[in-house]
Image: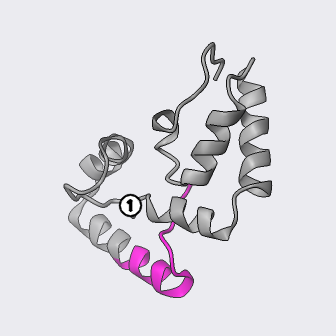
């Protein structure tokens, strides 16, 4: 993520945490991907609180979700899994997503 110009809040929208996006935008531009990743790690762990983490989690749809309300980016991210999943796989994903949300209070994510 070498950036010649500073990032904007819009550049960081995929994370879902306004505080993280603002801090990353303020820390940019980055000389290298390694610098951007170090900044992201530092900001996520030291500047974003639990509310910011929950805000980011809430911005991500459940795996396998097909809803008009999810972002274009999320639709693209999940399109391969959705297009190849059988009906029984989709049903099982929905059931496990619901169990996870019930137990932990937020959406299950593999990577964000």
Task: Find residue 79 and report its image quarter.
Answer: top left
Task: Find residue 31 and report its image quarter.
Answer: top right
The residue at 29%/42% (across/down) is: 72
Tell whether position 101 is magenta: yes
Nearer to the camera, 49 or 98: 49
Residue 112 seen in render: no
Magenta-highlighted residues: 95-112
Residue 67 seen in render: yes
Tell whether position 31 is magenta: no
Nearer to the camera, 1 or 81: 1
Taking 24 as reference, is 81 left or right?
left
**Above or below: residue 93 compared with residue 56:** below
- Residue extending furthest toward the bottom: 103
**Above or below: residue 49 compared with residue 12:** below
The residue at 30%/61% (across/down) is: 65
Taking 12 as reference, is 68 left or right?
left
Nearer to the camera, 32 or 55: 55
- Badge 1: how crowded within 10 Å, few (<14), some, or many (20+)? some
The residue at 62%/35% (across/down) is: 25
Taking 87 as reference, is 36 left or right?
right
* Location of mark 1 (residue): 61
The residue at 21%/65% (across/down) is: 87
Could you say where residue 103 lies in the image, as x and y percent from the top left? 53, 86
Q: Quadrant of the N terminus?
A: top right
Could you say where residue 80 lies in the image, as x and y percent from the top left? 33, 43
Could you say where residue 76 lies in the image, as x and y percent from the top left? 33, 40
Label 1 element class: loop
């Amino acid at each position: 993520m070498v950036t010649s110009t500073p990032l904007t809040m819009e550049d960081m929208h995929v994370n879902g945490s306004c505080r993280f996006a603002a801090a990353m935008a303020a820390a940019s531009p980055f000389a290298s991907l390694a610098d951007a990743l170090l900044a992201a790690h530092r900001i996520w762990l030291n500047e974003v609180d639990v509310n910011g983490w929950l805000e980011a989690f809430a911005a991500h749809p459940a795996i396998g979700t097909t809803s008009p309300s999810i972002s274009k980016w999320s639709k693209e991210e999940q399109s391969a899994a959705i297009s190849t999943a059988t009906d029984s796989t989709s049903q099982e994903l929905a059931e496990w997503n619901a169990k996870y949300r019930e137990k932990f209070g937020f959406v299950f994510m593999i990577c964000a």
